[in-house]
Amino acid sequence: MSIRARKRVDPRVNINKAYQVILNPLVTEKATQLSEFNKVVFAVPTTATKIDIKSSVEKIFSVKVKSVNTILLKGKTKRFKGIIGRRVDTKKAIVTLAPGNTIDLSVGA
């Protein structure tokens, strides 16, 4: 048993918070290839945790989530009209769904 105490997860997530955690689905070539393995890619805020992402996806799409992997993409430094600027940091979440669950992103809401 580890020394650190584990935080308890509140399974009751407010629907408004769920929509603030899941910003939008990312539809790219790589994300489409991952859909063959029952995985979906979402853009999330940089402050979102894996537990928040999991409970939000389960609340919004009514599916069972097996695991969540996150990627923090650092913004590039770019030059615009001689002024150095920086792009915003972004975070992606790759959500693996339990067998038998699917999310159809091709249907517009």
Image (cartoon, rainbow, N blue to C red):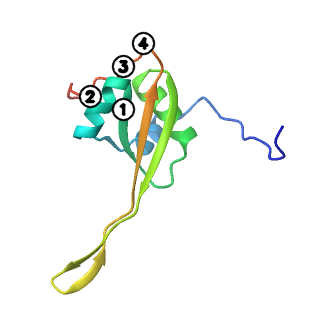
Q: Is residue 3 left or right of residue 86?
A: right
Tally the numbered discs: 4
Figure quadrant of residue 80: bottom left
* Mark positioned earlier in the residue sequence (4 or 2): 4
Whether residue 95 is situated above or below residue 49 in the rendered picture: above
For residue 78, what is the image quadrant? bottom left
Q: How far apart are marks 1 and 3 (CA)?
A: 9 Å
* Marks 4,2: beta carbons within 8 A: no
Seen at 39% across and 62% down, the residue is 89
Q: Which residue is under mark 2?
A: 105
> Which residue type does callout 1 highlight?
Val
In this view, 76 is above or below 81? above
Residue bearing the label numbered 4: 100
Mark 1 touches mark 4? (CB < 8 Å):
no
First in residue order: circle 1 vs circle 3: 1
Q: What element carries label 1?
A: strand
Badge 3 is on which residue?
102
Asked if labels 2 and 1 touch by Cβ distance under 8 angstroms, the answer is yes
Q: Looking at the image, which is closer to me, 70 or 18?
A: 70
Q: Mark 1 points at which residue?
A: 40
Q: Nearer the viewer, residue 35 or 85?
A: 35
- Label whose residue precedes the other's in the sequence (1 or 2): 1
Q: Nearer the viewer, residue 29 or 61?
A: 29
Image position, residue 71 (x, y; %): 44, 50
The image position of residue 50, as x and y in percent, is 54, 41
